[in-house]
Amino acid sequence: MSPVPVIFDLDGTLIDSVPDIAFALNAVFTEAGQEAFDLATVTSFIGNGLPNLVQKAMLARGMDLAGHPQMNAAMQARYREDPSSRTRIYPGALAALDQLQAQGRKLGLCTNKPEEAARLILDQLNLSSYFASVVGGGRLAVLKPDPAPLQLCMAELGRDEAIYVGDSEVDAETALAAGLPFLLYTEGYRKSPAETLPQTAAFSDFAELPWLVAEQG
Ligand SMILES: O=C(O)COP(=O)(O)O
Ligand SMILES: [Mg+2]
């Protein structure tokens, strides 16, 4: 039996994607006559998928949510046009993916980002070949923290066990709900202190990840 697979979150875990999300959001909002958002504010909107981010942004500007379908469609289209040119892979993440793969582990990706955008980004950053399963927002009727997307990713990897690696409260809750070990990357978009999230272990440097994974089996 090959070693336990590792499933990754995307935004705030493998990539710092806020600059592209903010660029698209600000284009849509300024075209609608609204003020732009700074990066910290956009970061605070991330975690529960793009439609939810648009809703939070509209509420922050006092906009009527009756316009949400239109704003959401505009954001999805704008983000798809260029989802990666300002996005960076976190330091050491590529080397960690290489090492985990060299251990014979299957890798998966489970994100709340719309799956089409997630796949575009993986292609554009040359990351697609690492992942035997990619499950993103829109594939199922539910998003994380429902455990179903993570369970689907495991099923696509052909296993009923995995280690989940993520950066947020949503990821910690998802892993807990699925009964999986959770490794918290502390340099992402978490809103609360790291120690308050249910976790198996935390790391701030991707060089630590292969060891933490090996400790889990
Ligand atoms: O799209 C989001 O809100 C968060 O995406 P993530 O699940 O990859 O962190
Ligand atoms: Mg994340």
Image: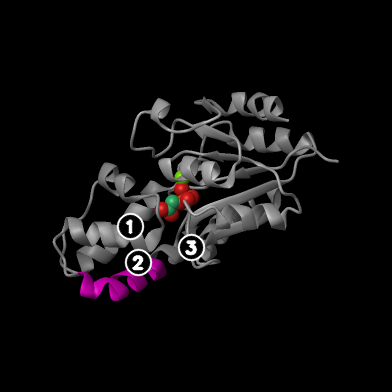
Q: Residue at x 52, y 53 (%)?
A: 111
Q: Position of residue 35 (x, y in %)?
A: 16, 57
- Indicate the secondary structure of the residue bearing disc 2: helix
Horizontal arrangement in the rendering, residue 19 relative to residue 174 (left or right):
left
Q: From this viewpoint, is residue 55 visible? A: yes
> Label 1 is placed on what type of residue?
Leu
Res. 53 mark:
1
Regarding residue 126, the answer to whether it shows in the image is no
Q: Is mark 1 within 8 Å of ligand 1?
A: yes
Residue 73, horizontal then vertical, whole percent: 36, 73
Question: As drawn, which residue projects farthest toward the right?
Answer: 1
Per the image, the residue denoted by label 2 is 75
Q: Which residues are magenta?
A: 65-77
Q: CA distance from mark 1 to mark 2?
A: 10 Å
Q: Residue at x 51, y 33 (%)?
A: 184
Instruction: Name above or below for residue 49 compared with residue 209.
Output: below
Q: Amino acid at mark 3?
A: Val
Please tell me which of labels 3 and 1 falls first in the chain.
Answer: 1
Q: Which residue is mark 3?
A: 142
Q: CA distance from mark 2 to mark 3?
A: 20 Å
Q: Is mark 3 within 8 Å of ligand 1?
A: no
Secondary structure category for the residue under label 1: helix
In this rendering, the answer to whether 115 lies above or below 91 is below
Q: Are marks 1 and 2 in contact (CB under 8 Å)?
A: yes
Secondary structure of the residue carrying tag 3 is: loop
